Image (spheres, grey):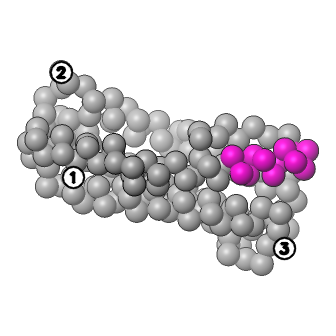
């Protein structure tokens, strides 16, 4: 199966590549929707602490699985040479997000009180955390720029 680590001379044209990227993005919307619902409970001050803790664990596990599946989907593409560097950075940045959430997921297993929950949620505010989360969005913007410069009509709806 082709890999993002290929020689960059894949069979995909730039237009076909971006069509596949857009298709993966559409799958991601469905993949991440249930996880987002868990975060609503985590942030609900009216919810019981144990419900919030359980929702956080589910959200983190869901983010790990969704980001790993997302990285795998992109890694299966063999990008054209014009986007090989950005593509490989996209796979790397999404994998880094999955790893970040995996670490938090392990820590979440030890959370059993309001103070523990508050402490773990504080991680989401740290600069290092935010930087890892923002990387895929920045790469998306770089990919959108390549598409625009090559007159490929696609809206990647980047979150950067």
Q: Earlier in the sequence, mark 1 or mark 3?
A: 3
Secondary structure, mark 1, is: helix
Q: On the rendered structure, is 121 left or right of 75?
A: left
Residue at 21% across, 57% down: 107
Instruction: In the rendered structure, find residue 108 and report the number of the disc placed on it.
Output: 1
The Cα–Cα distance between marks 2 and 1, rounded to whole angstroms, is 20 Å
Q: On the rendered structure, is 142 left or right of 96?
A: right
Residue at 62% across, 49% down: 138
Residue 142 visible (yes or no): yes
- Rendered image quadrant of residue 11: bottom right
> Looking at the picture, how far across and down is residue 92, in whole percent?
56, 65
Q: Earlier in the sequence, mark 2 or mark 3?
A: 3
Q: Nearer the viewer, residue 36 or 99?
A: 99
Q: On the rendered structure, is 90 left or right of 7?
A: left
Q: Is residue 148 magenta?
A: yes
Residue at 62% across, 59% down: 90
Residue at 84% across, 73% down: 9
Q: Is residue 89 magenta?
A: no
Segment tinted magenta in the rendering: 141-152
Q: Nearer the viewer, residue 104 or 47?
A: 104
For mark 3, what is the residue?
A: 9
Label 2–label 1 contact, CB within 8 A: no
For mark 2, what is the residue?
A: 46
Q: On the rendered structure, is 78 left or right of 44?
A: right
Residue 22 visible (yes or no): no
Figure check: 157 above or below 127: above
- Density class for disc 1 (Cα within 10 Å; few <14, some 14-19, many ≥20) is many
Q: Earlier in the sequence, mark 2 or mark 1?
A: 2
Indicate the quadrant containing the C terminus: top left, top right, bottom left or bottom right. Answer: top right
Figure check: 129 above or below 103: above
């Amino acid at each position: 199966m082709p890999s993002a680590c290929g020689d960059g001379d894949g069979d995909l044209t730039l237009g076909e590549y971006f069509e596949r990227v857009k298709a993966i993005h559409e799958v991601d919307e469905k993949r991440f929707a249930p996880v987002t619902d868990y975060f609503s409970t985590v942030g609900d001050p009216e919810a019981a602490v144990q419900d919030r803790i359980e929702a956080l664990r589910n959200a983190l596990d869901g983010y790990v699985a969704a980001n790993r599946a997302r990285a795998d989907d992109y890694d299966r593409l063999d990008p054209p040479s014009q986007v090989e560097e950005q593509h490989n950075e996209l796979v790397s940045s999404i994998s880094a997000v999955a790893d970040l959430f995996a670490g938090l997921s392990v820590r979440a297993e030890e959370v059993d009180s309001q103070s523990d929950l508050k402490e773990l949620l504080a991680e989401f505010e740290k600069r290092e955390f935010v930087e890892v989360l923002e990387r895929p969005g920045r790469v998306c913007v770089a990919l959108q720029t390549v598409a625009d410069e090559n007159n490929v009509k696609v809206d990647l709806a980047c979150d950067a």
